[in-house]
Amino acid sequence: MLQWTRHVAKQAAAIGVGLAVVGSSGLALADGHGHGQGHGRPNPAAHYNFNNLGSATWAQPALRLLVTQGVLQGVGNGQLNPNGQTTRAQMATMLGRLLGWNAGTPTPGAPVFQDNATIPSWALAFVQQAAKKGILQGEDDDFQPSQSVTWAQAAVIIDRVFSFPAVPSGQVGADLAQLPYSAGTPGWAAPSVAADVAAGLFQGLLGQIYMPNQPISRAELAALLQRAEQLKPAVVAQANSVVVGTITAVQSGSVTVATGQGAVTVPLESSVVIYEGGMATSTSVLQAGEGVVIGVDGTGQGAFVEITSGGPTAQAGSTASGAVASISQTEISVTAGGNTTTYLFAANLSVTGAASLAAVVPGDQVTLTVSSGNLVTAIDVTGAVSSASVGGNVTDVTTSNITLSPAGGGGPFVYAFAAGGPTVQGQATSLSGVADGDQVTLTLNSVGQVVTIDVTSTSTPAPTGSVSGVLVSSNATSNQVVVLVYANNQPSLTSVSLLGGAPVTLAGNAASLGALQTGDPVSVSLDAQSQGVSVQASALPSGEQIVSGSLVADTGGHVTVANGSGQVTLADGASPVAVSGGQIVAQGSIALDTAVSAASGAANGSLLLVVPA
């Protein structure tokens, strides 16, 4: 170590690079956040059952990744509690672990809250650092560590941490409108939420789900943090510094190095000098797994590289070879000799023989380097395929990706769609026809994106008819919907019982039955027994308004409904329809002060007035 340090010092002096920051602990990161992993903990993923997450199964990749990195820990007894609400103390702790803050270091100058004594000891240092940095703030001199964090609050905090580009004030409303349920976003949160939308934070998240004033669950926050990490700008080395670490990737004109403060990309000068064993050599010797010291000049480029330890062949651990059966951001399944084995990734994973992890696809022949903890530290692609296919059972599908439990076991795994979306064939003709439980075969391109979905069998019978009209009511408990149908301008009601697991979409995005409202235009596909096999709800027509409350006036031509927000008067329109007790009735038969749901412009410009059952 002393020999190469002297050598580096000599070269540094020649190019004017100071050694004040030599060593991974002194690396200066140019993104201003210090987004280092800072984890350095034994991998705890084996302590949790990721195949028993219930309704949070969709977030399994994010949960597994954050657990593996040490960002997310359980609540005891091997339980992650993915559907539990996230408290302010928990969020401060997750952010601190993600950003590499020291859990045991006092924070001089941090705000002192009146309720400091109620902050859990495991969270106190993280809360102090988050407060000092302005990431989390108190209210009325209290921190309120047990208070649940809402979606809007989480969106603002994530924007503060990752500093997504600001959206012009005139564009904020349009960006918010891209989220189906953005109504009710507080004014103080709107600019940050718009910046998150523009950056792509919500893309692929259960149909861009975002409920501003609802508490965010641990699984939902994990998915947002994983997405934010993917979107953050690349961290580059600061000018006039020295980078010390292990190469994880070699690109044309740059290298990426894993350091004690995270992955750092270092552009290389065209005249960069490479040293190995005290001798000058060429850039062709640089490979993933090599320990290096890189001197960075005043322009932020690597002027010299000292190779201090060997590449992949020098890594400790066993190897495993075979064909990739499936792969996600956190694990890989490899088939060899008829047996399929799944391995988790280490935090410092390196890839050779392919441009990146995203370029490793099912069918590729690979050799894995596996650590003593059974974690994959390196993937070497020895034989790549131009395209691949994978079959299995659909567990979730959105407008941007599909989640599959492969037929060979393992997973579930998330596969992103190629640009332009996939072609759908077989027993479905469009993406909206692909449902949970369907058996499908995916065709993947060379970077692992889905280009074709072949539905080989469906979880529900093929539809033989449909009922289209305006939604009067939906009942998630009995799994029924009531639809107002206009035929020859004559209104009638049709009640449809839905098959268990029948998919529901709203404006093209997966939704729950409870998300639909009175007045929504709907089309229910029916099987041969007139049972609903799917429900497609359209976006609300322009000018439609839905009001729930108490009927306080019916003047003939207008009705007035009052609720906690005040009174709203709606016009009857051309052919008003009133429904009570499951029957179409005369509007005047509904007494004043009766609880009603009124939809203006629901059909043919009419007013739909419903007395809830």
Image (cartoon, rainbow, N blue to C red):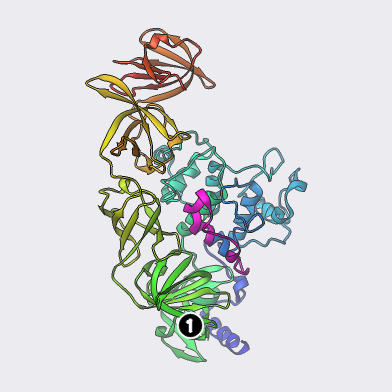
- Kindly identify the residue that appears in the image at 42 percent across and 45 percent down: 208
Whether 55 is among the magenta residues is yes
The amino acid marked with disc number 1 is: Pro
**Looking at the rendering, which quadrant does residue 390 occupy?**
bottom left
- Above or below — where is 596 with respect to 464? above
Q: Say which quadrant the N terminus sits in.
A: bottom right
Q: Is residue 53 left or right of residue 400?
A: right
- Kindly identify the residue that appears in the image at 44 percent across and 82 percent down: 286
The residue that mark 1 highlights is: 312
Whether 412 is among the magenta residues is no
In magenta, the rendered stretch is 38-64
Q: Is residue 314 visible?
A: yes
Badge 1: residue crowd in 10 Å (few <14, some 14–19, many ≥20): some
In x, y percent, where is residue 496? 36, 31
Considering the numbered disc 1 on the image, is that residue within a helix, a strand or a loop? helix
In x, y percent, where is residue 91? 61, 51
- Above or below — where is 217 with respect to 415? above
- Kindly identify the residue that appears in the image at 30 percent across and 15 percent down: 575
Q: Residue furthest left?
A: 488
